[in-house]
Amino acid sequence: MDFDVVVVGGGPVGENVAGRTAAGGLSTVMIEAELVGGECSYWACMPSKALLRPGHARAAAARVPGVPVGPLDVPAVLARRTEFTSNWDDSGQVKWAEGAGITVVRGRGSVTGEREVTVGSDVYRARHAVVMCTGSVPKMPPLPGLSSTPVWTSREATSAKAVPSSLVVLGGGVVGVEMAQVWARLGSSVTLVVSGPRPLPRFEEFVGPLVCDGLRADGVEVLLNARAASVAPGALTLEDGRVVRGDEILIATGRKPATSSGEPLAVDDTGLVSGVDGRWLYAAGDVTGRIMLTHQGKYEARAVGSAILARVAGEEPVPWSAGAASADHVAVPQVVFTDPEVAFVGRTAEQARASGLSVRGVDLDIAVAGSSLHADGYSGRARMVVDESRRTLVGVTFVGQDVAEMVHAATVAIVGEVTVDRLWHAVPAYPTISEVWLRLLESYGL
């Protein structure tokens, strides 16, 4: 029961920590209470994107004359989703872990002492590090009637075996807008209830209205500034007295760290948990509350694994080294896989100004040769946020069909602190949607 590293949680974050420490020669055990592969593999990223893609492909085909377009084959869509989850069977993930030299233990692990994790009656001790990668769970609002009402969370929304005839979605975040579009395109009558003036409020102000336009085009009824007052089977009552009815009600009001208190484990950039003596307890991913995105959690996990290996070797990680998750503060990319897609990295103009930067925003409609060839009537928007003192990008947002693949170029520019003067020489291929980079820089004055 003695290992160099004990990892609690076998989702994508835990897998990345364990894979890195095992590859570095440290004996590693990974403890998982549910399915190895975690939320992303079975109930989040993979099944949700598998459900979204057929509707996107059909809509894209309809925007190009000459392409036959028929209705979606719903059983085939759901079957493909299930294929991507391996039918909720994690044997393939377990085989990978064991092949990587990781010991896999089933059960719920709890830290019960210094460098000690207990699973049932078994105790696992760590010579060097315990790493908490327990992820997050849905954050349920304090609504009267909720505890006695069967509702969907993101798990039910991505694993449903049939299309509900009607669906009410409470919450205008990423899960809310993506699942509203999925089920509307699969034939459900969907109502999206958003408490504020627009969905996706953490993005640039133009993002929410453009996503709303896309949802409404698919028949979603979007209720803005609508606050829920209570819930009952098949009915959501709003504060203004309106009752919104649906066969299923999806609660998509955010997530919270999966800790006993629901509070995050505060960490530094190497993943060390604050307030713990001895430099042995680490955490990465959603449980830290830093950035609740799978790809960023995996990045933090790789940093934690590298930091542990460095400290075992008597070295100390420095910022922007492999053992420090420095990008968490300035260069986090995110994609909302609606139609139109939202691709964002860095800081919004408002966030940049609030941090004390002198910034200038450049806005453009995405109207270039590449976009006009990509789809008739292509509609999209781009914003580039420039730190005027350093003439470098600090934020970029794209909204439009198929813009997700454009965000990595912006991420590279921000992480690399490429000046706009040098970026001017990165010539976009013609005719691609990336031509918008040239137009943004021209609008900036280059």
Image: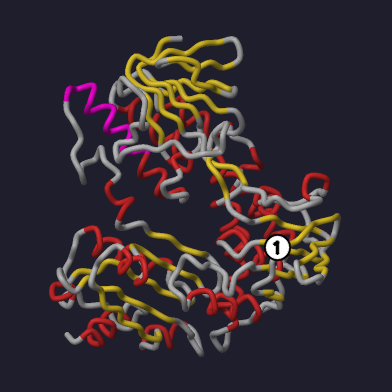
Residue at the spot x=34%, y=70% of the render?
396
Asked if one can make out residue 285 in the rendered structure from this viewpoint, the answer is: yes
**Residue type at mark 1?**
Val
Quarter of the image for residue 405 reads: bottom left
Asked if one can make out residue 435 in the rendered structure from this viewpoint, the answer is: no
> How far from the left and from the top, in percent, is residue 371?
41, 84
> How far from the left and from the top, in percent, is residue 253?
62, 56
Q: Which region is colored magenta?
A: 301-314
Quarter of the image for residue 411 reads: bottom left
Q: State the SS at label 1.
A: strand
Residue at the spot x=19%, y=87% of the render?
445
User: Relative to residue 162, is residue 56 depicted above or below?
Assistant: below
Residue at the spot x=22%, y=28% of the render?
310
Residue at the spot x=73%, y=70% of the render?
191
Quarter of the image for residue 13 reads: top left
Badge 1: residue crowd in 10 Å (few <14, some 14–19, many ≥20): many
Whether residue 81 sits left or right of residue 294 in the image: it is right
Circle 1 is placed at which residue position? 169
Of residue 239 and residue 201, the one placed in the foreground of this image is: 239
Of residue 149 and residue 59, the one placed in the foreground of this image is: 149
Whether residue 313 is in magenta: the answer is yes
